[in-house]
Image (cartoon, rainbow, N blue to C red):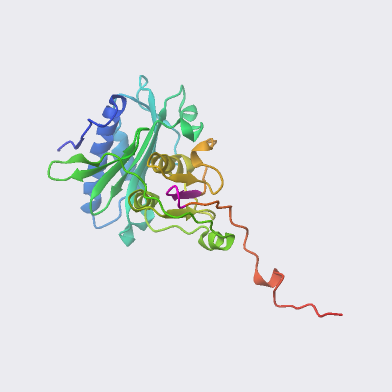
Amino acid sequence: MTVAGIDTTWIPERFRPLMTAVAHASARLSDMLRGRSDSLSTACARTLFADALQSPGIRWLYPAEDQAPVAVDGDGDLAMALTPLDGEADQDLNAPLASIFAIFPAAGDGQSSFLRPARDMLAAGYVLHGTHCCMVTSFGCGVQLSILDPAVSRFRLTSPQVRVPAHPQHDWPRTALRSSAGRRQAGSLAAEAHRILLRGGSFLCMDGDDLPRQLTVCAPLAFLVEQAGGVATDGISPLLAARIADLQARSPLNLGGAGSLGHHPLPEPEVPALFRHRGLFRVQGG
């Protein structure tokens, strides 16, 4: 089996073994997704990454929302939170899929490695699995874009400094926020972040039962967008200013260019027409 590689000249030395393992797992996963007529499960993707990440430097791995952090290397100094296959439920729509990861300094135990201010993140990234397999990463000094060259099974750096294009600012009315509450685009949210990184614009996921997970989706995407000069908030405050208090915590997600986001208050609850001031009943004057 060919071991996929990555151009490491732009990766800080501390992260090179880890990113080489991520590149290998991502290339294999991309090949598997292209070669299947049926859906690939998150469990399969999780196993693929867990096997590849048995490398120096990783002390704790949090590979899924229904598991506890897993000890990998007792001498490692890094902790990785991972969404192995974001967008799994929409594979039948041929929607974009992604693997998303966030890297923190390792603490003495798994929980403490991840339950901390999101701003403590050292690096983040995602791999989009589509027509082309691409990896977007940041190690705290801008955002880099690499494309998988299938001929040699290697991620090649194509954009060393991705910057979010600026767009005019919008202050969205509450009615617009309410109408989009709980609605998500098909596929991975990393695809929405990718669109913003390359083309600008904004994306809102402000309310509802399907808010993304703070640790494994919101925080890493916020890190990348901020590093590219964009803005990432929960509608009121920067996402990276929040403390991750629970591995299962969810959060509103509001991404955009520096000039595309205004103040986005959380949407007010929908009030049935019958109980509004202008409803079915009129009050007659005396």
Asked if the stretch drawn in magenta spans residue 255, the answer is yes
Point 30% across, 59% down: residue: 94
Horizontal side of 146 relative to 189 (left or right) equals left
Instruction: Tell me where residue 11 appears, x and y as whole percent.
Output: 27, 31
Of all residues, the one furthest to the left in this rendering is 151
Q: Name the one closer to the observer, 4 or 233.
A: 233
Determine the image quadrant of residue 15.
top left
In the rendered image, which quarter contains the N terminus?
top left
Horizontal side of 116 relative to 277 (left or right) equals left
Of all residues, the one furthest to the top in this rendering is 75
Instruction: Tell me where residue 109 appears, x and y as whole percent.
Output: 47, 24
Determine the image quadrant of residue 276.
bottom right
The tally of labels here is 0
Q: Is residue 66 visible?
A: no
Asked if the stretch drawn in magenta spans residue 264, the answer is no
Point 29% across, 39% down: residue: 48
Instruction: Tell me where residue 271 appears, x and y as whole percent.
Output: 65, 65
Magenta-highlighted residues: 253-260
In the rendered image, which quarter contains the C terminus?
bottom right
In this rendering, is residue 69 above or below 250? above
Q: Is residue 239 visible?
A: yes
Point 28% across, 25% down: residue: 13
Point 48% across, 35% down: residue: 118
Instruction: Tell me where residue 62 appears, x and y as whole percent.
Output: 41, 35
